[in-house]
Amino acid sequence: MIQRILVPLDGSDMAAQVLPHVRALATLFGARVTFMQATADEASNVDVGPGPDFLAFAAADLASTGIATDTLVAQGPPADAILDTAEQHSVDLIALCTHGRGGIRRFVLGSVAANLIGNTTMPLLIVRAKQASVDGVPTQTIDFRKILVPLDGSPLAASVLPIVGEIAAKAGATVVLLRAMPEPNEEAATSSSIQMLRSITGVKTEGADGAMADPYASQLEHEREGAQSSLDLAAAALQRSGIQTETIVEFGSAAETILRVASAQNADLVAMGTHGRSGLRRFLLGSVADRIVRYSEAPVLLMPNLAAVNQKSS
């Protein structure tokens, strides 16, 4: 359950573009929103007051719609200040915008954001800022009608499903479960692999007329069936909570497939679990999530690899 959302702001119009998404989530969950500014002071992290006018302005805008808000400024290295504030205030979600022409690459590779993303133990909502400037607090209405969730069959990828289920249940959204499968190497589907497919997977390698079946096509079909089965199990769990679901299996590059399906489905949110021994930081610096967060028109909800983050802190 999302009960408190932390929103770091820096006074820029681009950073403020996260606010419509925060407003939508806070309204759905009745959550309190804490707006904060993290200073670059090297002192110990402490709250030093309600903060500058841009924090008060953002808080007042959301408060006018009945959302509970508060503001604060935390001194200390910004990433540490944000993480410490999130922990001290029992935050359930951190929401922020990307900056600059370099998009997520610049955002992630900067020391503040890299430390924030690499060490958080809570979900992170990242909204890609548009280059056009906006005046004041953005007021567009955000509806979560369709949520795209890429899965790969691992528990880490599926770790995002509980929070997705909560959002979908409250918003009445449809959850689209996607499995992006790498295409098998067609050249590897030789006569020797035919026997392997027959003995290990049980895939038929002969047609009804006794002719040799295409081993590449057989392998694709076998992998598609396995992926579909995995998606069906995840979909059934969501459906038991009354959530509408769709499932898609496609072969191709993971990042390009996710971006293409998100666009084709008009996804309002892309939600992903993370991988890698170094948790979210390593995942974002990799090609798949880096491309998704940089190029997705929809905001991206990232669930950290808690085991990896805890291992780093131990």
Image: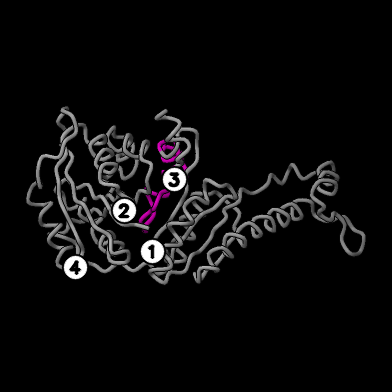
Q: Calculate the distance from the C-alpha at mark 1 to the C-alpha at mark 4.
A: 24 Å
- Mark 2 or mark 4, which is nearer the start of the sequence? 4
Q: Position of residue 314 (x, y in %)?
A: 42, 28
Side (left or right) of 50 relative to 211 = left
Q: Is residue 307 left or right of residue 26?
A: right
Q: Nearer the viewer, mark 4 or mark 2?
A: 4
Label 1, label 2: how far apart the Cα atoms are: 11 Å
Reading the image, the residue beneath label 4 is 66
Tell me the tag on residue 127.
2
Is tag 3's residue or tag 2's residue first in the polypeptide sequence?
2
| Rendering coords of residue 116 (x, y %) | 31, 38
Please tell me whether mark 3 sits on a helix, a strand or a loop: helix
Query: From what the image shows, is residue 101 above or below residue 13?
Result: above
Q: Going 32% across and 64% down the picture, which residue do you hit?
A: 29
Look at mark 3 in the image and give the residue it sits on: 289
Element marked by disc 4: loop
Amino acid found under the numbered disc labelled 4: Gly
* Stretch in magenta: 281-304
Q: Identify the residue shown where x is 62% and y is 62%.
A: 232
> Cβ–Cβ below 8 Å for labels 3 and 1?
no
Q: Answer few, some or many: residues within 10 Å of disc 1's Cα (few below 14, many 20 plus, some between 14 and 19).
A: many
Q: Report the amino acid beneath label 1.
A: Asp
Q: CA distance from mark 3 to mark 4?
A: 35 Å
